[in-house]
Amino acid sequence: MDIRSFTDFWPYYVRAHSLPRTRILHFIGSTLVLVCIVLGVTVSAWFFLAAPVVGYGFAWYGHFFVEHNKPATFGHPFYSLAADYVMVFKMITGRMDEEVRRHV
């Protein structure tokens, strides 16, 4: 797949997250990453080390055991990170299911 921009990447990302359980696991992981960052600033810098473990742990579990596909992070780490938070925002605003219907 020829991905040259985030706009090219987004439909691929959405298809890789077509199951609600995968999206929920990503939502949990992405939210906990933000919690770890806040705790890293306010409590202990050790929480910064926990952030990627927690975030990728939830996300990759969703890919390997729920969606049964390869995480987009492996091929496009920066687009994938940005797409995680776009997806979280769309989930909060109730627009992610529409994105899945449009791209799957």
Image (spheres, rainbow, N blue to C red):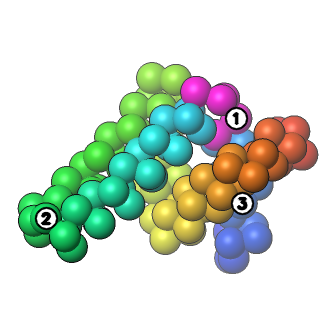
Q: Residues within 10 Å of mark 2 (few under 14, many from 20)?
A: few
Query: Between 97 and 92, which is closer to the camera in this rendering?
Result: 92
Three-letter code for the amino acid on which mark 1 is drawn: Ser
Q: Which residue is mark 1?
A: 18
Residue 11 lies in quadrant: bottom right
- Residue at the spot 13% in from the left edge and 65% down from the top edge: 43
The mark found on residue 44 in the picture is none
- Look at the numbered discs 3 and 1 and tell me whether their residues touch, using CB distance below 8 Å: no
Coordinates of residue 49 in the picture (x, y in percent): 16, 60
Q: Which residue is mark 2?
A: 43
Residue 104 lies in the magenta-colored region: no
The 10 Å Cα crowd at callout 3, few under 14, some 14 to 19, many 20 or more, is many
**Residue in the image at 78% along x and 45% along y:** 94
Residue at mark 3 to residue at mark 1: CA–CA distance: 12 Å
Image quadrant where one finds the N terminus: bottom right
Whether residue 75 is visible here, answered yes or no, is no
The residue under the point 64% across, 42% down is 16
Magenta residues? 17-21
Q: Which residue is mark 3?
A: 10
Between disc 2 and disc 3, the foreground one is: 2
In the picture as drawn, the residue positioned furthest to the front comes out as 42
Does residue 8 appear to the left or right of 17 in the view shown? right
Disc 2, SS: loop
Check if residue 18 falls in the magenta segment. yes
